[in-house]
C-alpha cells in the first residue's frame, strides 16, 4: 500500500480535523461554614503578694541541733587515713567529726579469711536496718545472710 506524499494540505477524502474534547469547567468551590472564633477568657493580672516576715519561732527547750559542729557544705574533701577500730570500739573521723563504731569482726570472731571474709549489706535488694535500727542484716559470701542485734 502506497501512501500519498504529504503536502501540508488536506486531501479531499480526509475528514476534517476534529477538536479534542475538553473537560467542562469545574463549578466554583462550595463555601465551608466557618466556626466563630472562640472567645478567650480574660485574665486579670494580680499584684504579686510580698512575703511577710514572720518571727522565727524559738526552738523547744529540749531542742538538739544534730548538725551542730558538723560539716554541712557540699565541697569535695580528700580522704584522710583512718585506723580501723577493734570490734565494737569507736573512732572519730578527723575530717567530719563523726563517730564510727565497728559492728562486725568477721576475721577475729568467726576466723574467716579470703573471699569469705566479707560481710556487706544487701542494699539493692533489702534494707539493712529494721525500722528502729535494733537489727542489722548482712550478707556473708559463702554462708548467706546473718542477723545482728
Image (tube, rainbow, N blue to C red):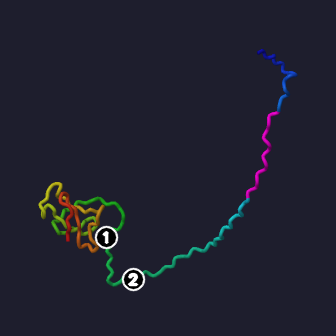
Count of residue discs: 2
* Label 2: element kind: loop
Q: Which residue lies furthest to the front in this view?
A: 1
Task: Tell whether position 16 is magenta.
Answer: no
Q: Where is residue 55 drawn, in percent x and y?
A: 45, 82
- Magenta region, residue range: 19-32
Residue 102 seen in render: no
Vertical side of 72 occupied by 13: above or below? above
With 106 as the anchor, is 53 left or right in this view?
A: right
Instruction: For the N terminus, give its image quadrant.
Output: top right
Extreme residue toward the top, this view = 2
Tell me if residue 86 comes above or below residue 46 in the rendering. above
| Residue in the foreground of this view, choosing between 31 and 118 | 31
**Could you say where residue 41 lies in the image, as x and y percent from the top left?**
65, 70
Out of 140 and 79, give the one closest to the viewer: 140
Image position, residue 8 (x, y; %): 84, 21
Q: Which residue is drawn at 56% across and 76% down?
A: 49
101 and 42: which is toward the camera: 42
Please indicate, yes or no, whether residue 96 appears anywhere in the rendered image. Answer: yes
Q: Residues within 10 Å of mark 1 (few under 14, many from 20)?
A: few
- Front position in the image: 54 or 128: 128
Dot 2, crowdedness within 10 Å: few (<14), some or many (≥20)? few
Query: Disc 2 versus disc 1: distance between alpha carbons?
Result: 22 Å
Quarter of the rendering occupied by the C terminus? bottom left
Image coords of residue 77 (percent x, y)? 31, 60
Main SS of the magenta part reads loop
> Of marks 2 and 1, which one's residue comes earlier in the chain?
2
- Mark 1, residue position: 70
Residue 58, disc: 2
Amino acid at each position: 500500500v502506497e501512501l500519498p506524499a504529504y503536502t501540508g494540505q488536506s486531501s479531499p477524502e480526509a475528514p476534517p480535523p476534529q477538536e479534542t474534547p475538553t473537560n467542562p469547567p469545574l463549578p466554583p468551590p462550595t463555601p465551608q461554614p466557618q466556626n466563630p472564633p472562640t472567645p478567650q477568657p480574660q485574665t486579670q493580672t494580680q499584684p504579686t503578694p510580698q512575703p511577710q516576715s514572720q518571727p522565727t519561732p524559738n526552738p523547744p527547750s529540749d531542742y538538739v541541733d544534730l548538725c551542730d559542729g558538723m560539716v554541712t557544705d557540699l565541697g569535695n574533701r580528700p580522704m584522710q587515713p583512718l585506723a580501723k577500730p577493734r570490734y565494737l570500739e569507736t573512732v572519730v573521723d578527723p575530717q567530719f567529726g563523726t563517730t564510727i563504731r565497728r559492728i562486725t569482726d568477721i576475721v577475729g570472731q568467726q576466723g574467716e579469711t579470703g573471699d569469705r571474709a566479707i560481710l556487706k549489706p544487701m542494699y539493692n535488694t533489702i534494707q539493712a536496718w529494721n525500722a528502729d535500727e535494733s537489727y542489722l542484716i548482712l550478707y556473708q559470701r559463702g554462708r548467706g545472710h546473718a542477723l545482728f542485734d
